[in-house]
Amino acid sequence: MQEQVIKGKVKERYGSITQPGSFESVCGTTECCCGSEVFSAVQMAKKIGYDTKELESVPESSIVGVGCGAPVNFADIKEGEVVVDIGSGDGIDVFLSANKVKDSGKVIGIDMTDQMLEKARNNAKQRFRTWNSKKEI
Ligand SMILES: C[S@@+](CC[C@H](N)C(=O)[O-])C[C@H]1O[C@@H](n2cnc3c(N)ncnc32)[C@H](O)[C@@H]1O
């Protein structure tokens, strides 16, 4: 498959996941790795390793539960560091990383799906109450 075709399919797939109710239509189908049982996005996030308390610290709409694990658990992120999340989706790991780097650090989320970026930006506005025009989101 050519590179552009693959990228188009990835964007189409993840673009559709941003639509309300779309997660439930993925989970429980033959595409799902969990068999026929249906889980919510939050339940799925817990199953793949996210901590309940940490999930409470991020906007609920950033939790899509389609990742492959909870990478922040393994990254040993420290205050003041700069974190780059490639394939950041709705931003869950960006927000969890922001909790760790605090105000002296920086987190950059990169995603190739426009709908994901749009949702992540809205989630960021919700998460960072002190957000102002000087901060790029
Ligand atoms: C499985 S989702 C994970 C989203 C998020 N990290 C999470 O755990 O909820 C993968 C994301 O990676 C993005 N993606 C896939 N390939 C990419 C690439 N080559 N460059 C940038 N983003 C990419 C997709 O658009 C999608 O939003």
Image (cartoon, helix red, strand yellow):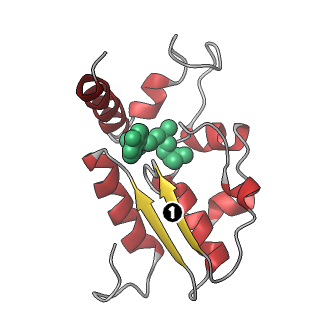
Q: Secondary structure at mark 1?
A: strand
Nearest the eye: 63 or 101: 101
- Residue 32 position by quadrant: top right
> Horizontal and vertical percent for residue 22?
39, 32
Picture quadrant of ligand 1: top left
Relative to residue 41, is residue 109 depicted above or below? Answer: below
Q: Residues within 10 Å of mark 1 (few under 14, many from 20)?
A: some
Residue type pointed to by label 1 = Val
Residue at x-position 71% and y-position 59%:
75
Residue at x-position 43% and y-position 49%:
89
Residue behind mark 1: 84
Relative to residue 128, is residue 110 depicted above or below? Answer: above
- Residue 100 position by quadrant: bottom right
Residue at x-position 34% and y-position 30%:
10
Nearest the eye: 54 or 8: 8
> Horizontal and vertical percent for residue 5?
25, 23
Nearest the eye: 17 or 28: 17
Residue at x-position 60% and y-position 44%:
42
> Horizontal and vertical percent for residue 113?
30, 44
Relative to residue 67, is residue 62 depicted above or below? Answer: below
